[in-house]
Amino acid sequence: MSRTQGTRTKDLRAGLTKLETQIARLVEFVTDGERSPAIDAKLKALEAEAKGVRREVKSVQRETATPIVLPTPKQMTALIFDLERRLMADVSRGREELRRLFRDGKIKLDPQAGGYYVARSEILPLVLMTGPPAEGDQGGRDQESRYSTISCAGRI
């Protein structure tokens, strides 16, 4: 359970306890013989609100009980090896996908003495697990040809 979901559940339960206490006090008041249209209306409103909060508590609990489905190693491999095809299919979307994959969206190119560049960046591994952007969003070849120099920095 994430912290936010745990906090949300705790807050919902505290609110529900308060509502149920108010309902119990009103029921006790009515059972003691006191009755008025305003009290009836308030009791109905509190009961409806408590019903909604109970439903929300159950919903949050279902969400926290649902396991996170992570891709299999085979799916991760396919996703990574398909990256070049997606990048080359639409350069603009490819740039957006790379920005999403790299820390701060950047690749640093360091010039080297031999007249070439070394590219450095930090891949955000959890972003890879979300998969490629769906068609319409921003957004293979075999393993041996997955790294090409097309659109990459070449000799200085």
Image: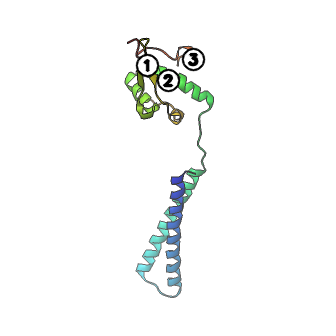
Q: Residues within 10 Å of mark 3 (few under 14, many from 20)?
A: few
In this orientation, which residue lies closer to the viewer: 9 or 134? 9
Quarter of image, res 59: bottom right
Say which label, 1 or 3, has the lower sequence index: 1
Q: Specify the farthest residue to the front.
A: 113
In this orientation, which residue lies closer to the viewer: 10 or 110? 110
Q: Is residue 133 visible?
A: no
Say which label, 3 or 2, has the lower sequence index: 2
Give the distance between the C-alpha atoms of the residues marked 1 and 3, in whole angstroms. 16 Å
Q: Residue beneath label 1, please?
A: 88
x, y (%) of residue 24? Answer: 53, 77
Q: Residue beneath label 2, please?
A: 83
Q: Are marks 2 and 1 in contact (CB under 8 Å)?
A: no
In the image, what residue occupies the spot 50% across and 71% down?
18
In the image, what residue occupies the spot 54% across and 22% down?
81
In the image, what residue occupies the spot 41% across and 34% down?
104
Q: Quadrant of the C terminus?
A: top left
Give the residue type that dot 3 points to.
Answer: Gln
Give the residue type that dot 2 points to.
Answer: Leu
Q: Specify the farthest residue to the right.
A: 73
Tell me the SS state at disc 3: helix
The dot on residue 61 is none
Q: Is residue 16 above or below residue 137?
A: below
Q: Specify the farthest residue to the bottom.
A: 33
Say which label, 2 or 1, has the lower sequence index: 2
Left or right: where 116 falls relative to 70: left
Q: Residues within 10 Å of mark 2 (few under 14, many from 20)?
A: many
Q: Is residue 43 visible?
A: yes
Q: Residue beneath label 3, please?
A: 143
Number of labels in the image equals: 3
Give the residue type that dot 1 points to.
Answer: Met
x, y (%) of residue 66? Answer: 60, 47
